[in-house]
Image (cartoon, coloured by chain):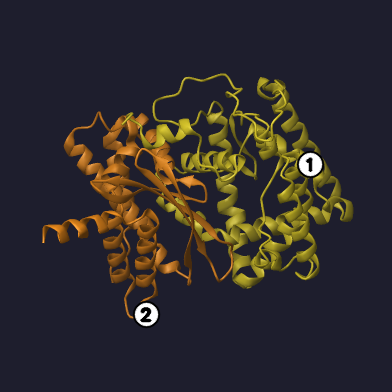
Amino acid sequence: MADVAKRLVDRWFTFILALALASPVLAEEPPPHPGPRPMPLPPLAEPAPQPPGVGEGDPWESFNRRMFWFNDKLDDYVLEPAAKGWDFVMPNRVETCVSNFFYNLRFPIDTLNDLLQGKVQYAVTDVGRFFVNTTVGLAGFFDPATSLGLEHHWEDFGQTLGWWGVGTGPYLVLPVLGPSDLRDGGGLIVDTAASITPFFVSSYYLLAARTVDLVNTRAIYADAIQKAKDSSLDYYTFVRNAYLQRRASLVNDQAAATEATQEDLYHPEGD
Amino acid sequence: MTFLALFAQTASTAESPRDLVRKLSDAVIAVLQEKNLSADAKREKIRGIVQDYVDFTTMSRLVLARNWSGLDDSKKAAFTEEFKQHLSVTYGRNVETYNNEKVEIVGDRDEGRGDWTVQTKILRPQGGGDILVDYRLRRIDGEWKVIDLIIERVSLVSNYRSQFQEVMANGGIDKLLQLLREKNAAGQPLKS
């Protein structure tokens, strides 16, 4: 079983690597930024002509839609039923605890990426959070750090690359993991390497833990996912747009969309 | 008298975007907390409040963007109506899932050209983490109106725009109206 997991990880790695090599997007290294906050670079991908009104290109749409369909079926037949069962036996408070526990284990990833973006204050906060939540928070099942004003910051390597000016590259739907893009998908490899858990547990348990995390997260967001499916006219486009907007905002750190996007969004007719 | 009327008018237009969002949130939460109202009655009340604060015409125009100017007036009106219905149905669902959430205003900023953003946080005492909701307001005919919601960094206007663009690219405005009508009919809360 451990072998299977390892082989899966290997394949996964090869898949991402092949994608990264196949695309010229990541091959071009952006010049390092001297200042603490880089200027946004022009997109590295070749500027595909876009129909008016569409804020996002999707050159891999045909592949993406098929992968999206596959994930959706996987969700319908495996993940959602599992999450429903989980939700049935687990009180909401326990689900929150499980979510806290896994979030706490992200601490090296968050901290590393804080530092790579020069956000020393965030890094200090994240280290503080880890110590408070691991001790007072009983191995991370509780989150007293947030009540103490140590708010969490989700930082990953995709964001770090974005902060240094690397464009997202094409939108990419990953198997099982869902919406991503070339940059963020590649970033996952670095984040996985930065994770502490593999040093303590065998890959078999790691796979089990990842599954629990996934099912638990699916259970927590069940209502939101159902609402999104019910209310959207085109669920694929809904998810793609939401993913790209959210990631762009996370890279910019809270700042609203870039000025060009704002202009297009709120003054589309130049009024 | 004239002086008083003038004064009253200045006072009402001097309402800050923050005050407006505070009033809107308080009004909605007050309805959600009422114990002696049916879900349907709550939805109806919330719809009324939202229509006072949101400018659906501007929102429709922003959502359709370049497609808007190509429509004749009847199509514009039809779209605005269906879109309004769609948002009401979608957000009316929150009536069932309300769980003692509170709204905190965390900041605001001038966006220039008559727009303002008010940042809020929905606090969830039952756990699950806070939700960031930003309101984009525009001064229209002397009054602040909501023209977009940015929920957890995702703008509704942008999100609907790309979905509608996708539909219109394949079937035009008629296809879009048809889909919206179907969704609205299916999503209509059951009347008891």
- Say whether residue A110 is visible: no
Q: Is residue A233 above or below residue B54?
A: above
Tell me the residue at 76%/48% (across/down): A111
State left or right for residue A262 relative to residue A248: left
* Residue at image location 70% in from the left, 38% down from the top: A160
Q: Kindly identify which residue carries mark 1.
A: A9
Q: Is residue A195 left or right of residue A163?
A: right
For label 2, the SS is loop
The percent coordinates of residue A35 (x first, y second) are: 69, 31
- Residue A27 numbered mark, or none: none
What x and y, as percent, mark residue A157?
71, 40
Image colour for chain A is yellow
Q: Is residue A27 visible?
A: yes
- Do marks 1 and 2 share a subunit? no
Chain B's colour? Answer: orange
- Picture layout, residue A236 above or below residue B43: above
Q: Quadrant of the C terminus of chain A?
A: top left
Task: Kindly identify which chain the residue marked by label 1 belongs to.
Answer: A
> Is residue A90 or residue B9 the one in the foreground?
B9
Determine the secondary structure under disc 1. Answer: helix
Residues B51 and A65: in front is B51
Measuring from the top left, give residue B88's x and y in whole percent. 32, 56
Foreground mark, 1 or 2, reads 2
Report the residue marked by disc 2. B35
Number of other residues with Cα within 10 Å of mark 1, as a class: few under 14, some 14 to 19, many 20 or more: some
